Amino acid sequence: MLTIAVYPGSFDPITFGHLDIAERAAKLFDELHILVVHNPAKSPRFSSEERVELVRASLSEVGIESKKITVDTLDSGLLVNYCRMVGATALVKGFRTSVDLDYELPMAQVNRDLADVETCFIPADPIHGHISSTLVKQVADLEGSVQKYVPEVVARALASSSANRKAKG
Ligand code: PNS
């Protein structure tokens, strides 16, 4: 039986921390779907299409060319419905600290209740423990260097989005 997992998130934008989790998760499953999900609690910097393109370009830039990985979007509806559609029995979530686990645990329990989908938590590598999409956007907006945190393609997209925001005031 194929083991298929979904790695969902806002990925607004994808960071080296996310890429590390994706690469490690791809070693554990036969197929991994990286899923860019619309989170109504957040107002994203990049559109779903832009985020998918940044995920694909980042995978290629850092040399994660696994044939096991698919990148997709979910703009509405339950995550577990997407899991059913692709035959996934597991979700992958990365966590940096217990704060992430406190946020993720109820979602993991609901997803198991709804569709018997198990969540596998992968601890962040300590070298990525302080990286978040939110901080990366803030550093870029304040014209700091984000090259340690994101691939070049994402750094360029952030620079251009920060410049546009500045121009608009
Ligand atoms: O990167 P994020 O924003 O923390 O990811 C959260 C996300 C998108 C994974 C979460 O909001 C989610 O699973 N949304 C899908 C909607 C859903 O199925 N909700 C019910 C179970 S949690």
Image: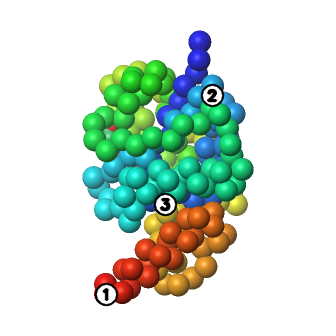
Disc 1 packing (10 Å; few <14; some 14–19; many ≥20)? few
Residue 105: % across, % down: 43, 40
Determine whether, in the image, residue 10 is placed left or right of residue 43: right
Q: Quadrant of the N terminus?
A: top right
Which of the 4 image quarters holds residue 130?
Answer: bottom right
* Mark toward the start of the polypeptide (3 vs 1): 3
Would you say residue 113 is visible in this rendering? no
Looking at numbered disc 3 in the image, what kind of residue is underneath it? Pro
Circle 1 is placed at which residue position?
169
Residue pointed to by mark 2: 29
Q: Amino acid at mark 1?
A: Gly
Q: Is residue 28 above or below residue 168?
A: above
The answer to whether residue 126 is left or right of residue 1 is right
Residue assigned mark 3: 13
Query: Residue 14: where, in percent of width, then height?
Result: 53, 57
Residue at 70% x, 60% y is 127
Of residue 88 and residue 71, the one placed in the foreground of this image is 71
Helix, strand or loop at mark 3: loop
State whether residue 6 is above or below residue 116.
Answer: below
In space, the residues marked 3 and 1 are separated at their CA atoms by: 22 Å
Task: Give the mark nearest the N terminus, 1 or 2.
Answer: 2
Q: Total marks drawn? A: 3
